[in-house]
Image (cartoon, grey):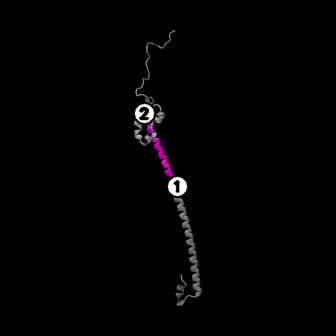
Amino acid sequence: MKREFLQSLLVAGAPLTKEVIDAIMAENGRDIESAKGDTAQLQALLAEKETWENSLRAEKENWEATLRAQQEKHEKALGEMQFSHTLDCAIREARGRNAKAISALLDLETLRGNPEAIGGAVDRLREEAPYLFESQVRPPLFAQGTGAQTGLREE
């Protein structure tokens, strides 16, 4: 508000006195100063809000990165478990005697890239090292005795 505006006002046909204009201007000045204080307070609150938002954003990004790392770790472990299970099943189906020994002779890195080739690799190893596998023909569970022994000792 400007002083000229107040001087141009007429109240009951007379202009405002200098004391009244000074009182109005003083009150207007206090209102402006108080509004400036509110503005400073609001700007401080906005700055604090931005700081909190940045902090929360950084914390969210940190949690997301941790989550992605854990997810990748667990997916890798799950893939390794699936590969191990597939390999063990193939060895068991081929009637392998010692899964660790058979696994040591296989090229596991190549098989990890192509799990469908596990059966073929086990079959090739079976041909190369048949002693690591049980034969397909099973011996009889028991054998009958030979001759006419009664099982009693004669003295």
> What residue is at 42 percent from the left and 38 percent from the top?
118
- Disc ID at residue 36: none
Q: Dividing the picture into quarters, in which one does residue 140 lie? A: top left
Q: In the image, is residue 65 part of the stretch drawn in magenta? A: yes
- From the top left corner, tell me how far across and down residue 24 is, in percent: 57, 82
Could you classify mark 2 by the number of other residues whose Cα lies within 10 Å: few (under 14), some (14-19), or many (20 or more)?
A: some
Q: In the image, is residue 17 part of the stretch drawn in magenta? A: no
Q: Reading the chain from its start, which is encountered first: label 2 or label 1?
A: 1
Judge from the rendering whether residue 5 lies leftward or rightward of residue 95; answer left or right. right
Q: Is residue 15 above or below residue 59?
A: below
- From the top left corner, tell me how far across and down residue 37 is, in percent: 58, 73
> What residue is at 59 percent from the left and 83 percent from the top?
23
Q: Nearer the viewer, residue 9 or 51?
A: 51
Q: Dividing the picture into quarters, in which one does residue 116 lie? A: top left
Q: Main secondary structure of the magenta part?
A: helix
Q: Is residue 43 above or below residue 103?
A: below
Q: Nearer the viewer, residue 131 or 33?
A: 131
Q: Secondary structure at mark 2?
A: helix
Q: Which residues are magenta?
A: 61-90
Q: Nearer the viewer, residue 122 or 136?
A: 122
> What residue is at 43 percent from the left and 39 percent from the top?
86
Depth check, mark 2 against mark 1: the one in front is 2
Could you classify mark 1 by the number of other residues whose Cα lies within 10 Å: few (under 14), some (14-19), or many (20 or more)?
A: few
- Disc ID at residue 62: 1
Q: Which residue is identified by label 2?
A: 125
The amino acid beneath tag 2 is: Leu
The CA distance from mark 2 to mark 1 is 48 Å
> What residue is at 56 percent from the left and 74 percent from the top?
36
- From the top left corner, tell me how far across and down residue 47 is, in percent: 55, 66
Extreme top residue here? Answer: 155
The amino acid beneath tag 1 is: Asn
Q: Is residue 1 above or below residue 59?
A: below
